[in-house]
Image (cartoon, rainbow, N blue to C red):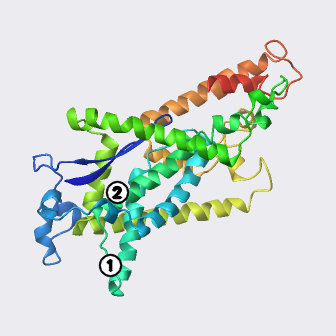
Amino acid sequence: MVTHNAERGFHGDSHENATFAVEETRSSGTMMIENERYGNGEGGGDSDDKSLSVEMLFKGKVVPSWREQLTIRAFVVSFVLGVLLTFIVMKLNLTTGIIPSLNVSAGLLGFFFVKSWAKFMEKSGMLKQPFTRQENTVIQTCVVATSGIAFSGGFGSYLFGMSSIVAGQSAKSIDAQNTKDPRLPWIIGFLFAVSFLGLFSVLPLRKIMVIDYKLTYPSGTATAHLINSFHTPQGAKLAKQQVRTLGKFFSFSFLWGFFQWFFTGGDGCGFSNFPTFGLEAYENRFYFDFSGTFVGVGMICPYLINVSVLVGAILSWGLMWPLIKNRKGDWYSAMLSDSNLMGVQGYRVSSS
């Protein structure tokens, strides 16, 4: 039995995590490590491993107990990666509203950091416990759950939408019963209720969906195969190359953002507010902000989602809102600002 992590990737409205055990079978669908993809046979003893399936490579290895899987190093790495990916999720949550599945990135980065630490401790003669696939799955699960709360917890939508500051944009009188300002104690209780509700609903569904019907969760299954491949000799080399490539693009994105900062003189100024398609289009929010984050998310998301977002932006910001703004003084008061919820902003919020 091998511990797998099933994580349903969410693109805007759903997120579930479940850790379960699945029986590995040596069937025609097993993932093979191909010589053409991972190497040319050099390395002596590694050539025999390249022709074996992942299941055969782990045959006979004892699965550690759950106490051995929950290590301090796993939680430390999970905390660091969780904070890093939460910033990314919050930026996307407050801008596009589309959050790609980050379980593959979490599994890859978790493997790289803990594997590097384990190698250092092994050379120092202080390694007490080897790094296993199950521990890698724990890291991936914790990171995805942590960053997922930033979206499913409503930090970019209703959680702050209930505040008195947002309610002050309305022309109606503010009532204490209709507002709820963010406070840490009740937010913690709310997040516990949201998180454990999903956990208790997933456990009964596991028996029906996974065990009885043997349904395959695409994102979770792909992550499980990926984590398994990381812990093979050639898979570890491939993971090292992937992390090196990820580091190059991360450095480029950071340096590009640092470069943009020098040309930012305030709000509405700089590369992030450059009128790419002209001033008239810029007034209707049509411009390219030169954000490396959005480019990367567009590469991760399926093309159908990218096309739907583009078409929706053209129809809403290019057609609907200009037409509604022309009805100012007829459909709503001409004295209201564009950010007032009783004016054109109310139409935007209600249709988004």
The amino acid type of the residue labelled 1 equals: Lys
Badge 1: how crowded within 10 Å, few (<14), some, or many (20+)?
few
**Nearer the viewer's eye, disc 1 or disc 2?**
1
Q: Nearer the viewer, residue 61 or 33?
A: 61
Query: Where does residue 140 sit, x and y in percent of width and height?
Result: 40, 56
Q: Nearer the viewer, residue 47 or 174?
A: 174
Query: Where does residue 174 sit, x and y in percent of width and height?
Result: 83, 28
Q: Residue furthest top?
A: 330
Label 2: which residue? 137
Q: Earlier in the sequence, mark 1 or mark 2?
A: 1
Q: CA distance from mark 1 to mark 2?
A: 19 Å
- SS type, badge 1: loop
Q: How many marks?
A: 2
Q: Nearer the viewer, residue 299 or 75?
A: 75
The residue lying at 13 percent from left, 62 percent from top is 59
Q: Nearer the viewer, residue 296 or 287?
A: 296
Instruction: Tell me if I can see residue 296 in this picture.
Output: no
The residue lying at 35 percent from left, 39 percent from top is 203
The residue lying at 56 percent from left, 60 percent from top is 253
The C terminus, quarter of image: top right
**Would residue 214 be found to the left or right of residue 112 on screen?**
left
Q: Residue furthest right?
A: 335
State the mark number for residue 119.
Answer: none
Query: Where does residue 21 sit, x and y in percent of width and height?
Result: 25, 49
**Would residue 167 be found to the left or right of residue 316 on screen?**
right
Label 1: which residue? 128
The amino acid type of the residue labelled 2 equals: Thr
Q: Is residue 299 above or below residue 208?
A: below
- SS type, badge 2: helix
